[in-house]
Amino acid sequence: MVQLTQAPAGDAGQSGRAEPSGGTGPSGVARTMTYAAAAAAALADLMRADASVVALGEDLGRGGIFGQYRGLLEEFGARRVIDTPISEATIAGSAVGMALTGLKPVVEMRVVDFALCAMDEIVNQAAKNRFMFGGQGRVSMVIRMPIGIWSASAAQHSQSLEAWFAHVPGLAVVCPATPQDNYALLKAAVASGDPVAYFEHKELWGLEGEVDASQPIEIGRARIARPGRDLTIVAWSRAVHDALDAARTLAVQGIDAEVIDLRTLWPWDRETVEASARRTGRVLVAHEAVQVAGFGAEIVATLAERGDAMWAPSPAPKLARLGTPRAPVGYSPPLEAHVRITAAKIAEAAAQLVVRTR
């Protein structure tokens, strides 16, 4: 079982410091890093390579509330690691202006819940500018908006709103699940030249894993985290780890589940998901966001719209989705546990799909 530990606020541990060469040692040799440290290392590499990359937001000077900026102020100074007032609209609006003058701002919203105060700047300004003015300006901007349940943090600090941003034309949407992906996808997001809604999970900051700076990841490419033959489970962010735990439970029951880490919601890797669906004949999409109008519905609808003829000679895959209830996340542990998507809930939904379609 993967241990998902929450890094203390403002402290990613000893490995939370931004290391040289992406923190991976000489010649691209991988080393173990936390999810938070991987992001700090990626941003440090970007800032060393390109003077136009800047970071701005609240509490960056002390390393960010999760340690994801640790060491950057000391190396790059206050002109490039900018502590801002407590005003998300001001932060995002300033970043749009910076991007239009040629800078590449990385914007920290602390948690996605707070980004709702900057929706006009993100949705109407950053996402639309390139299209409204004939491409004369491009908003090369990455908006970091941590998502997901944050233990005992209640309704205003525990939301997963990635589907909102996937609905907005002009935004790419990225959801890394591992330290390696948080390193490589943050670098890809900055390099893309367009506005990217970048969603890290609040309970993944302390997760450790191997990071190799020499291994790039392309936005829009999923990975098969576990191959299988009986069922495909599609997930992203923290739910990937729950899906992998569920797959181990299902294996004991004689069900061989394939797990796909989608990595990005827009663009999303239809080819990898469709190819897996052809192999297994069953697809369950599991995510921590509310099930109603969640991105799982988009994936299921896209596969369903392919129609029987498009899947021939095999029958069309059987489809299901699993998300949280349409309810605010409670503060008390029992209420919070009720809405969490867990490995047990994913395993149960997957087993029901297999039994129902055999």
Image: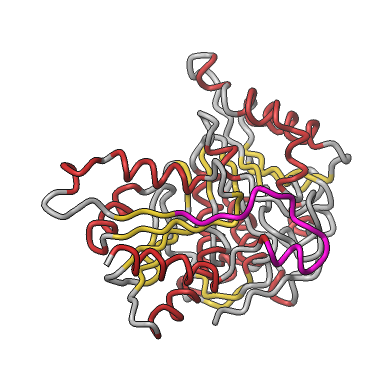
Residue 239 location (% of width, % of height): 55, 63
Going 23% across and 40% down the picture, which residue do you hit?
A: 307
Where, quadrant-wise, is the N terminus in this rendering?
bottom right
Query: The C terminus appears in which quarter of the rendering?
Result: bottom left
Point 78% across, 45% down: residue: 57
Which quadrant of the view contains residue 99? top right
Residue furthest front as drawn: 356
Which span is picked out in magenta? Answer: 321-338
**Residue 307 horizontal side relative to residue 18, left or right:** left
Task: Residue at 54%, 66% (x, y): give it.
Answer: 178
Q: Is residue 331 magenta?
A: yes
Q: Position of residue 150 (x, y in %)?
A: 74, 61
Q: Residue furthest top?
A: 133
Q: Residue at x 54, y 14 (%)?
A: 133
Q: Nearer the viewer, residue 242 or 85?
A: 242
Q: How many marks?
A: 0
Reply yes or no: does residue 141 show up in magenta.
Answer: no
Query: Which sits in the foreground, 80 or 155?
Result: 155
Residue extending farthest bottom: 252
Residue 265 position in % (x across, y down): 48, 46
* Residue farthest along the right direction in this orientation: 85
Residue 121: name its quadrant: top right
38 left or right of 279 in image: right
The x, y position of residue 251, in whole percent, is 38, 81
Position of residue 73 relative to residue 168, above or below, is: below
Q: Nearer the viewer, residue 321 or 147?
A: 321
Q: How is the image coloured?
A: secondary structure
